[in-house]
Image (cartoon, rainbow, N blue to C red):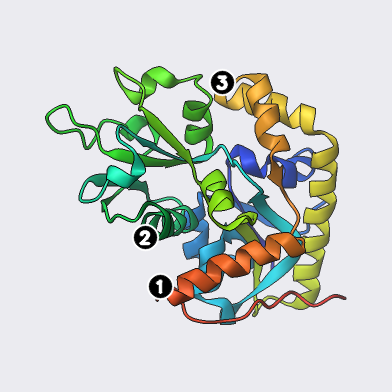
Amino acid sequence: MTTRVGRIPYVNCYPVYGAIDRGVVKLDGELVTGVPSVLNRAMAEGALDVSVVSAVEYARDAHRYLLLPDVSISCDGPVRSVLMFSDVPAESLGGRRVVVSKSSMTSVALLELLFENVWKCRPEFVPGDAEMSDLHAFERGGTRPARLVIGDAALLLGSGDARGDLGPEPYAHVYDLGAEWKRWTGLPFVFAVWIASRTTPVAEALGVHASLIESRDWGLAHRALLARQAHDATGVSLAACDEYLSGLDYGLSYPHLAGLTEFFRRLVSAGRVPNGTLAFLPAA
């Protein structure tokens, strides 16, 4: 049976899959593309064997999964593709609407923690795609809600290359959730991890992991090529694409694990995920 491997189509995954897409690195499996929420669900339903998922998906059901070592999508400061736009300061959003993307559990969970612990207020979270095509869907009486935008749409809007898509006037406040976490905790933040189902044969999962690491290493060595691909795909300036990719980390080092476990600890304390442990795919 073919190993089913999930991949996210966003620019932030280009360095991990770039060599596989180009045939430079062989992957013994079938790639399945979807946004984070779709891949999360596919893993939970057993429709995928190995996948990149929102970090919260691992914490939500850790007993079913194994983490793949040394690969993640992380930042140690600004992430540039997980942004909240608001006409008023975050501290003034109590009782106001915040449209949150349905595509990423981790980004929404992080935003909730920031409101509770940093900005000290409780807005009304309104589920919505919050992509560029949906930026006006919840406007009433000329008052715009704050919006959490993720992925390539956030990169495009945050770079200023599509500022007009935000409406007649730019939002007065833009919050980068990676930077806000770093300011709050002093730690890196892990947005996504790669996991294998515990029912996936270890040899198959190890083979996929080896291909992902080899492809990731190739991608990091060919960042300029991937920045050009990102520019062509999104319209974001080449310089902004290169800055974006250079600001992400694709490993899972001790500092990143410290940030990941701190995030999970806070989610457990808030009652949002069950208590658990980090379990990794065993070495061959």
Q: Residue at 24% of width from left, 35% of height from top?
A: 137
Question: Which residue is depicted at the point 70% across and 28% down?
Answer: 242
Tell which circle, 1 or 3, labels the residue nearer the N-terminal end. Answer: 3
The answer to whether residue 266 is seen in the rendering is yes
**Which circle's residue, 1 or 2, is located before the other in the chain?**
2
Residue at 42% in and 20% down = 163
Q: Residue furthest left?
A: 141
Query: In the rendered image, is residue 25 in sight?
Result: no
Check contact, mark 1 vs mark 3: CB within 8 A.
no
Q: Which dot marks residue 235?
A: 3
- Residue 87 numbered tag: none
Q: Which residue does the numbered mark 2 point to in the structure image?
A: 116
Position of residue 1 relative to residue 150, above or below, is below
Asked whether, in this view, residue 229 is left or right of residue 123, the answer is right
Q: Which residue is mark 1?
A: 270
Asked which secondary structure carries label 3, the reply is loop
Please tell me which residue is depicted at 57% across the width and 77% down the height of the picture: 62
Do residues under tags 1 and 2 come within 8 Å of each other at their CB atoms?
A: yes
Q: Amino acid at mark 1?
A: Ala
Up-down relation of residue 196 to residue 210 (above or below): below
Residue 108 appears at what percent x and percent y?
42, 55
Query: Looking at the image, is mark 3 or mark 2 earlier in the sequence?
Result: 2
- Number of labelled discs? 3
Question: Quick one: quadrant of the C terminus?
Answer: bottom right
- Tag in front: 1 or 2: 2
Disc 3 marks which amino acid? Gly
Q: Secondary structure at mark 1?
A: loop
